[in-house]
């Protein structure tokens, strides 16, 4: 149950086995159903999640009731509604499982305890933050200057199996286009 997280941490750090065991002990296993809301809009986020199996998305709903997907995370990835997790203010987005998923969950208190206690874990956290920043920047730039086809091509370059795991409706909401436009573009790739 913890072997995937252990491998993830080992690949990114030089933590000795005893430290890895202490870190893994702070995580709890959680199984979630497809479409289950893990963090609700307006809820203060108190947990960080590692995806052992499955997929989740972060999204919001605009004033017209349209869902706008901001981020998708798959196996071997940490995720949370980061702004709420950091500043402990109500989330302005949802975290939802899009597949039946198995998560390893750590409380905010324990997470920041690990960041303080283990330099290697602090470095991993910085990598998570840097990845989040870079991903968001790439997404912003793609919306500013890329055609619809270029957006899809960039997505497939970064995550080749994305369109195999995510429905057209959700993928289109992430790419800022209609599902019919996405279907038409997929036929050209």
Image (spheres, rainbow, N blue to C red):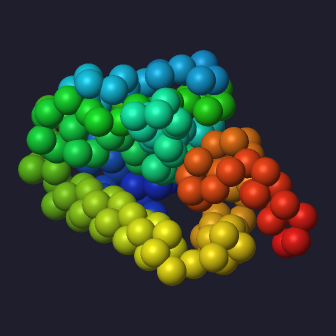
Inspect this view and state whether residue 29 appears.
Answer: no
Q: Residue at x 63, y 23 (%)?
A: 34
Residue 108 point in image, percent of width and height: 19, 34
Residue 120 lies, with reference to residue 28, above or below; the image says below
Q: Residue furthest front?
A: 64
Towards the viewer: 107 or 91: 91
Residue 68 lies, with reference to residue 158, above or below; the image says above
Q: Residue at x 29, y 36 (%)?
A: 92
Occupied quadrant, residue 101: top right
Q: How many marks?
A: 0
Towards the viewer: 31 or 10: 31
Residue 185 lies, with reference to residue 20, above or below; the image says below
Q: Residue at x 59, y 39 (%)?
A: 55
Residue 45 point in image, percent of width and height: 25, 30
Inspect this view and state whether residue 19 appears.
Answer: yes
Occupied quadrant, residue 50: top left
Residue 154 point in image, percent of width and height: 63, 74
Q: Residue at x 41, y 47 (%)?
A: 78
Going by the image, does 60 lie left or right of 47?
right
Residue 128 lies, with reference to residue 110, above or below; the image says below
Residue 89 point in image, percent of width and height: 14, 33
Q: Residue furthest right?
A: 187
């Amino acid at each position: 149950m913890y072997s995937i997280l252990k491998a993830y941490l080992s690949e990114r750090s030089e933590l000795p086995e005893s430290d890895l065991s202490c870190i893994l002990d702070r995580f709890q296993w959680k199984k979630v159903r497809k479409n289950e809301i893990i963090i609700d809009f307006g809820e203060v986020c108190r947990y960080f999640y590692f995806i052992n199996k499955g997929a989740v998305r972060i999204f919001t709903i605009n004033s017209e009731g349209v869902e706008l997907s901001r981020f998708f995370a798959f196996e071997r990835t940490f995720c949370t509604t980061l702004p709420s997790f950091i500043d402990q203010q109500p989330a302005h987005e949802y975290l939802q499982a899009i597949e039946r998923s198995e998560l390893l969950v750590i409380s905010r208190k324990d997470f920041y305890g690990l960041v303080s206690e283990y330099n290697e874990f602090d470095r991993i956290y910085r990598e998570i933050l840097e990845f989040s920043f870079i991903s968001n920047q790439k997404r912003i730039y793609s919306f500013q200057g890329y055609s619809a086809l270029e957006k899809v091509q960039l997505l497939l370059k970064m995550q080749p199996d994305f369109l195999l795991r995510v429905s057209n409706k959700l993928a289109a909401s992430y790419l800022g286009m209609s599902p019919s436009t996405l279907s038409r573009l997929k036929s050209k790739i």
